Amino acid sequence: MNKTLRKPAIAGNWKMNNTPQQTTALIEELKPLVKDATCDVIVCVPYIDLHAALAATKGSNVMVGAENCHWAESGAFTGEISAAMLKDIGVPYVIVGHSERRQYFGETDLTVRDRTRAALNAGLKVILCVGELKEQRLENITAEVVRMQTKLALKDVLESELDNIIIAYEPVWAIGTGLTATPEQANEVCAIIRDLVAELYGKTAADKMVVQYGGSMNEKNADELLGQPDIDGGLIGGASLVAAKFAAIVAAASK
Ligand code: PGA
């Protein structure tokens, strides 16, 4: 597979952190540190911080994402935000299917599929998260789990829409735990995802698909992870909350 066909993407996932004021401060600190990046740089922030993030990133190479969106266009879904609402205020990216949504908020492969579809319909770019639980890795069913999650999420996605999708492989046991998949483990699963994309859409589509690794990626291990042939970037939680750490990962992806 030819890595030069793909532009790496480093995305921060701030989760439930930072007020609007803190958002402005962190992005102002980050901007000069990542201005020469040759990879895509994205910060995914809580809904309430989106306006501040859009204002602070204006005119820079830092792009903004939300952390979720609903599958319906509008309606009686108290507490939810639609993809069209995100698009309307100028948000380009959205994370869908994060394991914390699956674990704590009843997200299923089918709701992930529907949210993905809704995001694409609204013209958003999707960071689609998949990954196995620790028990599933121990049972040696990582490939099956990740293939199933990815296949179901992409079920209604056309080949022409794949440019608007990044797939993030995030082993659940590695998220926020300090446990990172070894570069070989991470690469192996990213390659499995790419092979599945080839099965579903053909080799050209697979060669172009950006597949990130996420799970305790930091400024120390980024070089080695990002050096793997099938890893095209990262989805970064904890380390994205510190400008210098996130910038170091962006620098590693820009080599
Ligand atoms: P982490 O989170 O980098 O803190 O492990 C990654 C994620 O959940 O996207």
Image (cartoon, rainbow, N blue to C red):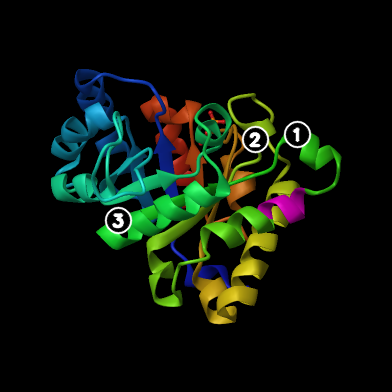
Q: Is residue 229 visible?
A: no
Q: Tell which of 140 and 36 is nearer to you.
A: 140
Q: Tell which of 144 and 173 is nearer to you.
A: 144
Q: Which residues are magenta?
A: 142-146
Which residue in the structure is indicated by mark 3?
A: 124
Q: Where the N terminus falls, by quadrant?
A: bottom right
Q: Is residue 101 visible?
A: yes
**Which of the marked residues, 2 or 1, is nearer the chain's N terminus?**
1
Magenta: main secondary structure: helix
Residue 161: horizontal and vertical position, in percent?
A: 39, 70
Q: Is residue 90 magenta?
A: no
Residue 18: horizontal and vertical position, in percent?
A: 31, 20
Q: Residue at position x 30%, y 29% from top?
A: 79
Check disc 3 and report its element: helix, strand or loop. Answer: loop
Q: Tell which of 116 and 202 is nearer to you.
A: 116
Residue 128: horizontal and vertical position, in percent?
A: 48, 51
Which residue in the structure is indicated by mark 2?
A: 172
**Which of the marked residues, 2 or 3, is nearer the chain's N terminus?**
3
Whole-angstrom CA distance, mark 2 to mark 3, is 25 Å
Which residue in the structure is indicated by mark 1?
A: 134
133 relative to 209, above or below: above
* Residue extending furthest toward the right: 139
| Disc 3 CB within 8 Å of nearest ligand 1 atom | no
Q: Are marks 2 and 1 in contact (CB under 8 Å)?
A: yes
Residue type, label 2: Val
Q: Residues within 10 Å of mark 2 (few under 14, many from 20)?
A: many
Whole-angstrom CA distance, mark 1 to mark 3, is 31 Å
